Image (spheres, grey):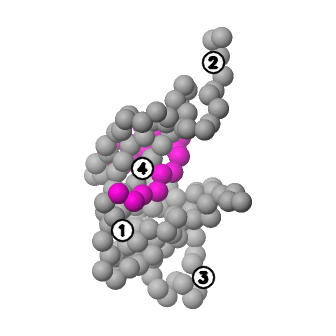
Amino acid sequence: MITAVDHVRLGAPPGSEDALRAYGGGVLGLTEVPKPPALAARGGCWFEAGPVAPHLGVEPGFRPSATAHPGPRVRDIDALARRLEAHGAAVTWDDGLPGPRRFFTHGPVGNRLEFLEPTRNRTAPGEPQPADPDG
């Protein structure tokens, strides 16, 4: 029945929109999408990049989760890791599970983020193995 994820909502503290825009639009290269007027008055911001749509909503008393996180797939994960580190974000690589290459980091308000890139002979669970060009 479920065909796709429409969006992922993450919390953010009041007044953090400038930091969220600098990170989402500047560092990650996402496009900000205008919120509907009734929701814009609540603060926060929405972004998108193709089918990925993170929504950041203001939460009074916000506290980032220690473990909950989105896990977007990316291309050129090494370049993304370098870009994040150049902007002061710590990147922690994790190869403890089979499947794509991945790392964890934290966004500007402390939300945990996981970035994944399927690679040759290391696909995500349930995905077909890529063809071996050598044989």
Say if 33 sits above or below 85 in the image: below
* Side of 46 relative to 87 (left or right): right
Q: Secondary structure at mark 4?
A: strand
Q: Amino acid at mark 1?
A: Ala
**What residue lies at 30% left-to-right and 71% top-to-bottom?**
63
Tell which circle, 3 or 1, labels the residue nearer the N-terminal end: 1
Q: Residue tagged by mark 3?
A: 36
Q: Magenta segment, which residues?
A: 67-86
**Inter-mark Cα distance, 3 to 2:** 47 Å
Q: Residues within 10 Å of mark 4 (few under 14, many from 20)?
A: some
Say if 131 sits above or below 68 in the image: above
**Inter-mark Cα distance, 3 to 1:** 21 Å
Q: Nearer the viewer, mark 3 or mark 2?
A: 2
Q: Residues within 10 Å of mark 2 (few under 14, many from 20)?
A: few
Tell which circle, 3 or 2, labels the residue nearer the N-terminal end: 3
Q: Residue tagged by mark 2?
A: 132
**Inter-mark Cα distance, 4 to 1:** 19 Å
Q: Position of residue 91 (x, y in %)?
A: 32, 45
**Res. 60 image quadrant:** bottom left
Q: Is residue 76 visible?
A: no
Q: Residue tagged by mark 1?
A: 19
Q: Amino acid at mark 2?
A: Asp
**What residue lies at 69% left-to-right and 57% top-to-bottom?**
3
Instruction: Name the residue at the front extreme.
Output: 1
Q: Amino acid at mark 3?
A: Pro
**Inter-mark Cα distance, 4 to 3:** 28 Å
Q: Secondary structure at mark 2?
A: loop
Q: Position of residue 73 (x, y in %)?
A: 53, 46
In magenta stretch: residue 55: no
**What residue lies at 63% left-to-right and 55% top-to-bottom?**
50
